[in-house]
Image (cartoon, rainbow, N blue to C red):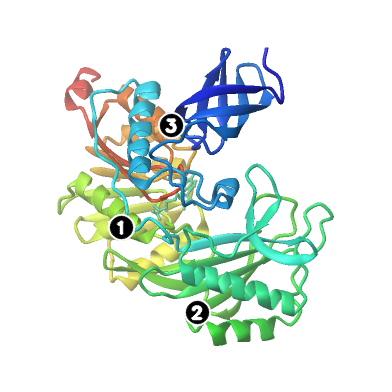
Amino acid sequence: MLKKNDIVDTEIVDLSHEGQGIAKVAGFVFFVDNALPGEKIRMRVLKVKKAIGFGKVEEYLSRSPFRNEDLNADYLRTGIADLGHLVYSEQLKTKRRQVINTLYKIAAISDVQVAETLGMSNPYAYRNKAQVPVRRVNGQLETGFFRKHSHDLLPISDYYIQNKEIDRLINFTRDLLRRFDLKPYDEKEETGLIRNLVVRRGHYSGEMMLIFVTRRPKIFRIEQITEKIVAEFPAVKSIIQNINDKKTNAVFGSDFKTLYGKDTIEDTMLGNRYAISAPSFYQVNTEMAEILYQTAIDFAEAKKNDIVIDAYSGIGTIGLLFAGKVKGVYGVEVVEEAVADAKRNAALNSITNAHYVADSAEQAMATWEKEGIKPNILLVDPPRKGLTENFIKASSAMQPDKLVYISCNPATMARDIKLYGELGYKLQKVQPVDLFPMTHHVETVGLLVRNIKDDKRGG
Ligand code: SAH
């Protein structure tokens, strides 16, 4: 029986979805950080549970030819780049394999083409958004990243996968906060002021938004701070304060206040203009999100008379790209600010046939069905937890011919596709797109088509 601190020699046989190496020892499945398939390691046992355990590499007895030896290990320790130790071409293969395996395991689908993962030619510094905690470390205000599974801040200045101008703005702001002697948040004591810095940057426009997340409303000498930031970074068009006085892991509280400039920044995607406000979702990798949306457009093959539902529409990114090709678009999104953005974005692009409602997707489907809206194409782009059974039933009752499923979690996507399968929709093709290079995250587009034959049999 293995116990803590035992040392065993073993081989890594697989990679977990979170990027950990998997070893099988004495009937246990061990998860090991920074260990790649094929590597032989001397492993220290950290913890054993019923059937699984956690281990740590004491020594590499052999190293994978696919190991990226240049990676700064801090990026693995924090999870900034939890797959960064694997060379990029292998990351893309791993992600495709994960989609294939998940579809098979969860939905018993093995007869569908899963295309090669579309990746980036330069898979670094791609993020257009940063969300950085501010804490005191060794007596000094620091910005950085938490070590995995902890709230221990590891100070960082080069965030590796973030746009370099964003890094520079964060470091500059950190230095100002030190100079003006503002207090970093202390989670244990529930004291201090500055909890997080959040930065967003338009990939094409270069416009930046800086958000101070604070525990209390008052920021001492904020006028001087914003003045200095804007003088150094003319691209900062919006400085916002968010107040979060709760003991929570959620970054934002509900109150947003514009301290300087506009409430939104603007960017373009596939030629459309988009205004983005602080609480709204916006894909963090613009270059690859354009490829993702283009894939959705290609899969849908929309026609002039089509009616499109864009469920989980955010600021309208995808739906507004369809608007010019079809008769009408109906979008639903639960965050009210995002819906306001979507409406404004329709106007920005002179689109008059897109309609947005602030509601839950489930509720909106029921309402639209009552109103007699008959979609030919349904686009869904839910968060990680995927769709609900109610949504799936309500949407298939509307009998769209095609369903384009954009997913950031293959497991919930497979679960939902299985249920759609029982309701007469067949998965036709799948395209993984790498929106999150160097991390374990996978984005996938799937096309489902209504099976007319089954439908008739069912009456
Ligand atoms: N399609 C958009 C947004 C995708 S992210 C884009 O590509 O930019 C998923 C969105 O779903 C988020 O904006 C989130 O606020 C929204 N959301 C989460 N749960 C929801 C629900 N139950 N009903 C409607 N929208 C929801």
Residue matched to label 1? 290
Q: Residue furthest front?
A: 61
Q: Position of residue 186 (x, y in %)?
A: 78, 58
Local packing at callout 1 (Cα closer than 10 Å; few below 14, some 14-19, many 20+) is some
Local packing at callout 3 (Cα closer than 10 Å; few below 14, some 14-19, many 20+) is many
Q: Which mark is residue 171?
A: none
Q: Residue furthest right?
A: 189
Q: Which mark is residue 237?
A: 2
Q: Earlier in the sequence, mark 2 or mark 1?
A: 2
Q: Nearer the viewer, residue 289 or 388?
A: 289
Count of numbered circles on the image: 3
The C terminus lies in quadrant: top left
Q: Amino acid at mark 3?
A: Ala
3 and 2 marks in contact (CB < 8 Å): no
Q: Position of residue 335 (x, y in %)?
A: 51, 55
Q: Nearer the viewer, residue 342 or 132?
A: 132
Q: Amino acid at mark 1?
A: Glu
Residue shown at 74%/70% (left/top)?
A: 217
The image quadrant of residue 342 is bottom left
Is residue 24 placed above or below 267 in the rendered structure? above
Instruction: Give the Cα distance between marks 3 and 2.
Output: 39 Å
Q: Position of residue 28 (x, y in %)?
A: 58, 17
Is 342 left or right of 117, judged from the image as shown?
right
Q: Nearer the viewer, residue 215 or 21?
A: 21
**Circle 2 — which element?**
strand
Q: Amino acid at mark 2?
A: Lys
Residue matched to label 3? 411
Instruction: Give the Cα distance between marks 1 and 3.
Output: 23 Å
Is 147 left or right of 104, judged from the image as shown?
right
Q: Nearer the viewer, residue 210 or 72?
A: 72
1 and 3 marks in contact (CB < 8 Å): no
